Image: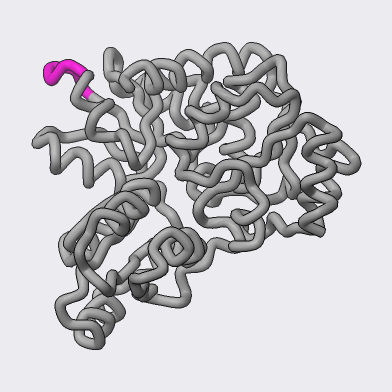
């Protein structure tokens, strides 16, 4: 299967991008693996004619928005994001009407329709840096993740208008589970994703995007590290740091949508050139402005 995928990539002049949460075997055949920010940047830099996005739909949608001249495929179009689906463009417009003059900010984990209603996007990896560019006298609407929003809000020391969305996977992490992991591995640093609830973030040593977790793992002198995010990242952490031990805080942190991409449907996607991700032009133009505003921050 791997050999077939490699042949199909060459035949289609295709590049495969995979998120850190996808299956290990999918990460292994990908040309690039990363978090949302890394993959958004890579999507603008690749020279291939075809981009196959292994992740969830909003990620492929973002790649299509940034590359209107390329063919963007997703192996399983049903790989959605429950958090992204927690707000619609109409709901955001109504919220903006109640806060005239506010800067509308969306987490990249949102639909193209929502991005089109926003002034700028952020990822968990660059949110603090991007938010610092917004004048402090401006009111801020932050959607859809209330946990990432409250995390950055506390770092900045100013209040945001938060939409009550959340990641169901990270919401499963409990204080009792964290305490048990700490007790079983005393002294091991704990890194969690900022999509986790505040109680969990406050218990952690590091609050990082998946890209940040990979950097921390490389640079830390710790032999054992506790990981509080979707378990798919363990594959990359272990591959890149063979001398270290990575312990998932909970084996229940599995995103079923991130696991929908398999070697079989990846090969089928390349073989049959399906499923193409197309964003309505008027939405794509407005969403592109919000994404490019984020990328311009650096």
Question: Going by the image, does 231 lie left or right of 62?
Answer: left
**Quadrant of residue 272 in the image?**
top right
**Residue that sits furthest to the front in the current view:** 243
At x 85%, y 36%, the residue is 273
Examine the structure image and report whether residue 36 is included in the region drawn in magenta: no
At x 43%, y 54%, the residue is 167
In the image, residue 34 sits, relative to residue 126, either above or below, namely below
**Quadrant of residue 126 in the image?**
top left
In the image, residue 279 sits, relative to residue 127, either above or below, namely above
In the image, residue 201 sits, relative to residue 16, either above or below, namely below
Q: How is the image coloured?
A: one colour
| Residue 238 seen in this snapshot | yes
**Quadrant of residue 134 in the image?**
top left
User: From the image, which quarter does the C terminus lie in?
Assistant: top left
Give the image location of residue 60, x and y in percent.
63, 36
**Residue that sits furthest to the bottom in the current view:** 184
Examine the structure image and report whether residue 135 is included in the region drawn in magenta: yes
Span shown in magenta: 134-139
Question: Going by the image, does 229 lie left or right of 58?
Answer: left
């Amino acid at each position: 299967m791997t050999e077939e995928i490699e042949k199909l990539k060459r035949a289609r002049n295709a590049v495969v991008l995979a998120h850190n949460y996808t299956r290990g075997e999918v990460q292994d055949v990908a040309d690039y693996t990363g978090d949302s920010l890394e993959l958004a940047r890579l999507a603008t830099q690749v020279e291939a004619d075809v981009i196959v996005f292994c992740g969830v739909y909003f990620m492929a949608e973002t790649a299509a928005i940034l590359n209107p001249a390329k063919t963007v495929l997703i192996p399983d179009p049903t790989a959605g994001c429950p958090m992204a689906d927690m707000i619609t463009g109409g709901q955001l417009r109504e919220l903006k009407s109640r806060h005239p003059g506010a800067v509308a900010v969306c987490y990249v984990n949102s639909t193209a329709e929502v991005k089109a209603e926003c002034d700028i996007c952020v990822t968990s990896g660059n949110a603090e840096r991007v938010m610092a560019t917004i004048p402090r006298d401006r009111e801020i609407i932050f959607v859809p993740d209330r946990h990432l929003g409250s995390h950055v809000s506390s770092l900045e020391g100013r209040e945001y208008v938060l939409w009550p969305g959340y990641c169901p996977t990270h919401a499963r992490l409990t204080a009792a589970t964290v305490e048990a992991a700490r007790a079983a591995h005393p002294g091991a640093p704990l890194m969690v994703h900022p999509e986790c609830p505040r109680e969990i973030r406050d218990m952690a040593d590091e609050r990082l995007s998946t890209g940040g977790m990979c950097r921390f793992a490389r640079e830390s002198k710790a032999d054992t590290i506790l990981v509080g995010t979707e378990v798919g990242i363990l594959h990359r952490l272990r591959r890149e740091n063979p001398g270290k031990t990575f312990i998932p805080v909970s084996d229940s942190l599995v995103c079923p949508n991130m696991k929908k991409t398999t070697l079989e449907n990846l090969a089928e996607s390349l073989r049959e050139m399906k499923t193409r991700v197309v964003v309505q032009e008027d939405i794509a133009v407005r969403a592109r402005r919000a994404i490019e505003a984020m990328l311009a921050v650096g």
